[in-house]
Amino acid sequence: MKTADSDTDRTVIDNNLHNCNITSEWDNESISQGGFIMERFKKYVAEFIGTMVLVLMGCGTAMLVGCDSAAGCGYILTALAFGLAIVAMAYSIGNVSGCHVNPAVSLAVFMNKGIDGIDLVGYIIAQILGALAGSGLLCLIFSLGKVTDKTGALGSNGTVGVSGSSAAAFITEFVLTFIFVIAILGVTSKKASHGSFGGLVIGLTLTFVHILGIGLTGTSVNPARSIGPAIVCAIQGNTAPVSSLWIFIVAPLAGAAIASIVYKFIESKKN
């Protein structure tokens, strides 16, 4: 026969077990959320590193060899430096974050539902910080080594090549970004099987658009790549790059957005 005391003891035990289960569920949920946050943070670190390398190698090469028309080899060397930086990063951090290293690319991927809004903001912040770090390193290296910066502004973008025309610069950056981003969307499309050549194709496409754009605007197609050198130059007292910075933010973002819309349309299935 059960006594009142035994029934009370069993009730207490059941309640304790229930509370333990709730606590365990909370703990598992906390661990899961912590792991999710850490995975996001790893992506942002990867984007920081990738953008820093892009600016360091691309702008650094331009600063070292120059990009004026009298030294034609400077065009090719700078274009290759930017392209090869993307190739190197695509096969190193690409498996972590996708190697966007470019707010315009992140915007296009977001519009194609490749990342969510939180990652879009996180990626862009990381990319801008990476570009600032890369520009800061270049400033430090060239200053300590007393090396002449042949671009005069840490490889910043500008409108000198188009006679100061903001319209011409805007169109140039819009079109070049459109070409670059639509190539990225095509080569990374899940509907196509491009294997492991995606990073190489994207790097070569960046080289491709640089060959034309360097003599016109210095080629941005990447707001972060433009923001980094412009801000560091401004800190040093050279505010010229900042005056036209809006072009190299708005035009690439607009070009990427239109590329995303167009690619969705041309890739969509026929009814």
Image: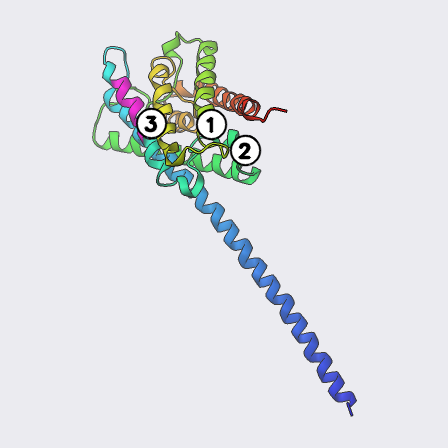
Q: Quadrant of the N terminus?
A: bottom right
Amino acid residing under circle 3: Gly
Q: Is residue 187 left or right of residue 16?
A: left
Q: Image quadrant of residue 184?
A: top left
Answer yes or no: do the residues labelled 1 and 3 have beta carbons within 8 Å?
A: no
Q: Quadrant of residue 237?
A: top left
Instruction: State the residue at coordinates (38%, 24%).
Output: 205
Q: Nearer the viewer, mark 1 or mark 3?
A: 1
Q: Amino acid at mark 1?
A: Gly
The magenta-colored residue range is 74-84
Considering only vertical position in the picture, is 43 above or below 60? below
Q: Position of residue 169 (x, y in %)?
A: 44, 13
Mark 3 residue element: helix
Residue of label 3: 83
* Element carrying mark 2: helix
> Between 187 and 156, which is closer to the camera in this rendering?
187
Q: Quadrant of the C terminus?
A: top right
Q: Main secondary structure of the magenta part?
A: helix
Which residue does the numbered mark 2 point to in the structure image? Answer: 110
Report whether 167 appears left or right of 26. left
- Its colouring scheme is rainbow
Pointer 2 with pointer 3, Cβ within 8 A: no
Report how far apart the C-alphas of labels 2 and 3 lie in the structure: 23 Å
Q: Nearer the viewer, mark 1 or mark 2?
A: 1
